[in-house]
Amino acid sequence: MIRLGRHGVALVGVLVIVASAVLAALAPALAPADPIRNDLLSRLTPPMWMDGGSGRHPLGTDTLGRDVVSRLLYGARVSLLVGFAAVLVAGAVGVALGLVAGYYGGRLDDLLMRVGDVQLAFPVLVLAIAVLSVLGASLGNVIVVLGVTGWVTYARIARAETLSLRQRDFVEGARALGARDGAILWRHILPNVLPPITVVATFSVARTIIAEASLSFLGLGIPPPAPSWGAMLDEGRNYLTTGWWLALFPGLAILLLVLGINLVGDWLRDALDPRVERGM
Amino acid sequence: MARFLARRLIHAVFVVWGVVTVVFFILRLTGDPAAFLVDQTATREEIFHARHLLGLDRPLHAQYLDFIAAVPRGDFGLSIQQRRPALPIVLEHLWPATAELALAAIVLATVLAIPLGVVAATHRDGPLDHLSRVGSLFLQSMPSFWLGLMLILVFAVALGGLLPAFGSGSLRHLILPALTLAAAPLAQNVRLIRSGLLEVLQQDYVRTARAKGLAERGVVYRHALRNAAGPFLTVTGLSLGFMLSGTLVIETVFSWPGLGRLMVQAVPGRDFPVIQAAVVVFAVLFVAVNLIVDVVHGLVDPRARVA
């Protein structure tokens, strides 16, 4: 096994993320075919290196004759968009609530933390499915549901950090100089809360991408025919004997992207959060 | 201990009340729950009739109080697809199918994790440790349902039906879904046991145990492992939440006749009473297991009672 330093491993992760983003952005230019156009005459074409494969469809076609590479490229857009947007929503809501709860304490703090306990009692997919079955499946709804259900972890971390920071000298000093609460939270406390939040958020992006794939796999994420990696796996699972590539490649795409994000997360944790022991 | 118990119990009841409240409001997110509680082919008059019958034309707070009163009686209404009470349907799918699968996965994730974690810790930074680190990273980075599909591809398709791809009823049917469900928690447990052990192995009492001539195996399994168990226990309780989420997709992949698949299949049929009952049962299970874990942790380690 090649030994890369810790920075080297993280660099591989960054490269994977950047490459995915570039491929997703350039999907219209790179895709060999229209990702949602059916071509029933060439359905279930195997990858190009197999018997019966063709250079026109490097990774083959699905049961409706749609090009797998093109669908993977466009699918990356969905995964990245949902992953980052939902975490942004969750992080913004969670940090704001956590700062306020930690800074002011009292009843509000109690209330928020109890609501958080209730939120955590729902397994993520269970709650997401219940809500999506009422609201209907769409890209926007998936982002909102995964975003809103994810706030608790951020709120807890932001609250804990704020509790320990609000008595510190530099905060007391700012207060003595007449700084208002809003300014103290924004300028003095938030910057110190962000490092651990960034670490958690990175791992959350990875988990959210898997959650979106799961929802789409169950038919509750991005509605067809839009290409999403989870939905592609759902379509492929009934053709394991005749079209194994349909179940293999979208999963590899998810694995690669999530792995890249997790590698960056590990590195950030070591770099930004010294309290977490390096042993992990 | 009694005060600790009482406090945990009150907290659990509060959380369950919160869960039921959230479930009540989910159905009202679009403003018209009646549309979800009648057949999709219902006429306008039938919807109005159902609205009256279900009390949905009454004020919101009255409906809420009705709901809160009905849930402890196990009354979630009639399943739209099966035309019988929703809760018994949910419980039939929870026990035995989902319970069997989840227990098998928890046992696998724990039993396999102990030797693997010990090997990783005792061979720190060696090839075995690296292998376990890379393996954990991969297992935690893949969607569980994809792992399931790949296992089917290998064991049921490529190896000519060595193991059945779907269905239930025998131990052979249980192997693939249980392995799939266990994979991610197993990966996490191995790393946890490793880091827990590494910390404990530096303690004085471990040095003492070694100094009095105990075999290394005895030191690790008798003295160190026991003290590394606390965090492991807590995380196992929490990872049940991930596992319950996992049953939704994994039962669907393997056509396992459990609660997760029931809930997923209730969505296209808009069988809301079943969905509501399933959500509450999932959440109550999660709360109950974590309550038990907390109490066990409190019994084993008095320091845990303070928090």
Image: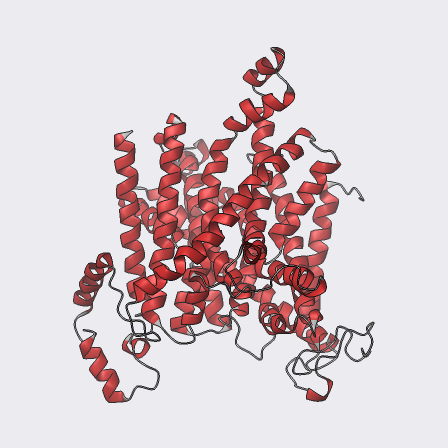
Furthest residue in direction top, as rendered? B212
Looking at the rendering, in which quadrant would you find the N terminus of chain A? top right
Q: What is the x, y in percent for residue B50?
A: 23, 80
- How many marks the image carries: the answer is 0
Q: Is residue A203 left or right of residue A161?
A: right
Residue B180 in percent (x, y) is at 58, 55
Residue B3: image location, x then y, percent: 26, 32
Give the residue drawn at x 31%, y 50%.
B15
Q: Residue at x 32, y 48 (%)?
A: A114
Q: Is residue A123 visible?
A: no
Quarter occupied by residue A169? top left
Position above or below: A279 against A76:
above
Q: Position of residue B274 (x, y in %)?
A: 34, 67
- Compared to B212, does B11 lie above or below? below
Q: How is the image coloured?
A: secondary structure
**Residue in the foreground of this view, choosing between B153 and B276:** B153
Q: Nearer the viewer, residue A71 or B122?
A: B122
- Looking at the image, which residue sits at the far front? B170
In the rendered image, is residue B6 in sight? yes
**Which quadrant of the figure contains the C terminus of chain A?**
top right
Which quadrant of the view contains residue A257?
bottom right
> Which residue is pictured at 50% across the width and 42% down the height?
A192
Of residues A201 and A124, the one nearer the viewer is: A124
